[in-house]
Image (spheres, rainbow, N blue to C red):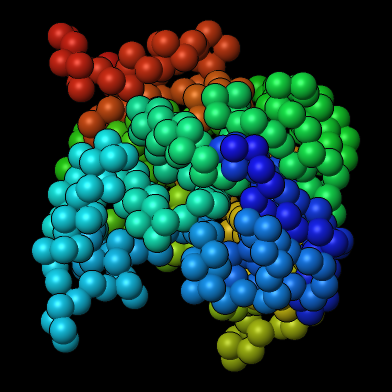
Amino acid sequence: MNEIIVLMDNISKSFPGVKALDHVHFELRSGEVMALLGENGAGKSTLMKILSGVYTRDDGTMKIFGREYGDLNPKQAQEAGVAIIHQELNMCRHLSVAENMFLGREKKKGFVLSDGEMEAEAKKILDELKIGLDPRQVVGDLAVSKQQMVEIAKALSTNARVLIMDEPTSALTAREIDDLFRIIRDLKAKGCGIVYISHRLEELQHIVDRVTIMRDGQYIKTVNFEDTGLDEIIADMVGREIKEKFPRVSCKKGKKVLEVKGLNAGHMVRDVNFSLYEGEIVGFAGLMGAGRTETTRAIFGVDPKESGEIILDGNQVVIHKPEDAIQAGIVLAPEDRKKDGLCTKLSIRHNIALPNLDLLCNRLGVVSTRKEAEMCSRVVTDLKVKTPTVEVEAGNLSGGNQQKVVVGKWLARNSRVVIFDEPTRGIDVAAKVEIYNLMNDLKQQGIAVMFVSSEMPEVMGIADRIIVMCDGRITGELAAEEATQNQILTLATRFEKKIAGGASQGGE
């Protein structure tokens, strides 16, 4: 235990126009959890992709369990004992748990797959991890949290002794996070070295031994977690002290902008009523599966509505599809930015221009390159998007910068309502503050801001008013300055706990 099992020294890596890593040092010991921290674009994922064989390095040396390696491919990294669990899970949804765990390493009897042997071994690993899953279950039928547990089991089935976890708790509930931490402690006790990448710094105290901090592609320092504080870690990550994690501005509450009446859509949006006003930010809180995302999708026209009215500035608007909402002045930054908010293979310029072609084209349908350049420049400058040029593919940006592009494309329009669904998921502290400042800017402009977040401190820190949902219904409304986490949690579990009494609907 405590032997150095990974040593990376002077690692450098460049992409066209970007130096991603500049002589970075990193080490990992057996039986420890090493937090790898830094802002989006600091180089954390690039460094780990070199260790796991996804990228090749330009310079530097790498030793795994004392053996020096040149450039690895993923199969060689796996054979060396390295496994990575990516933030975006890579599962074959139509296959079973066991089939996913042994994909590419199938067990055979002659030329025939040995399903029984794979299922038995998968069950053994799942039982050791205390994960109550049937190895024959289809992965696509599982919750995201359970799919993540399957990824961990898959990594351990390869006899991985170096486990890289990239934002592993971003889609988990509090109870599921506790289960994950239990698994991490068990793996640590068995001598596994774990690299833990997360922007949820409050989690670190529960599992982390040491912290390696990166900034702008460079190694800053490695410290024992117990010898440092979160404020110091954040200052090292961003290169300055962040005085306010939740900046708040005061505005006079203006007229009613949006009113939602009797909204029903599918099983997860049941008789939802609320209003949004000028000069305020309204946060939607609740547990996973409460129906918050489904509510945003129904308002925006992504999912069909069974019934209900949407009234904007006193006039009823009919929204059958997102185009209707956009034209009316209601826009959405969706929860899954890669799947629903971006064309990752297209450039930043194209991503910003596409939903705004009606503003950029002349009568003949020809795009004004001058208007397009001005629009893109304004978004990149105002939101501080880190990119050498707007021609960079959106998929090559860090998570925080991708989120800025998703939001930025709507800022060119005279939108009346901006809906954010989990806007800070998977982005760093400094980028979060920039998103909060953006919300405050919109609020000051008289734009109604609605945002969904699973982070209670975030909702309480940024929202002026908090609406809580449970089981597809609004269960209560709180003024942010008076709200407590216990009050929010009580409302968020109202129907689950079968508390007597009717639901108090928010809005008017």
Instruction: Tell me if I can see residue 39 in this picture.
Output: no
Q: Is residue 62 above or below residue 224?
A: below
In this rendering, the count of numbered labels is 0
Q: Is residue 167 above or below residue 436?
A: below
> What residue lies at 64% left-to-right and 51% top-to-bottom?
5
Q: Position of residue 188 (x, y in %)?
A: 50, 36
Instruction: Tell me if I can see residue 233 in this picture.
Output: yes
Question: For the C terminus, which image quadrant?
Answer: top left
Question: For the N terminus, which image quadrant?
Answer: top right
Quarter residue 222 falls in: top right
> What residue lies at 37% left-to-right and 17% top-to-bottom?
489
Q: Is residue 40 above or below residue 487?
A: below
Q: Position of residue 85 (x, y in %)?
A: 48, 55
> What residue lies at 30% left-to-right and 61% top-to-bottom?
101
Quarter residue 481 falls in: top right
Q: Position of residue 399 (x, y in %)?
A: 62, 55
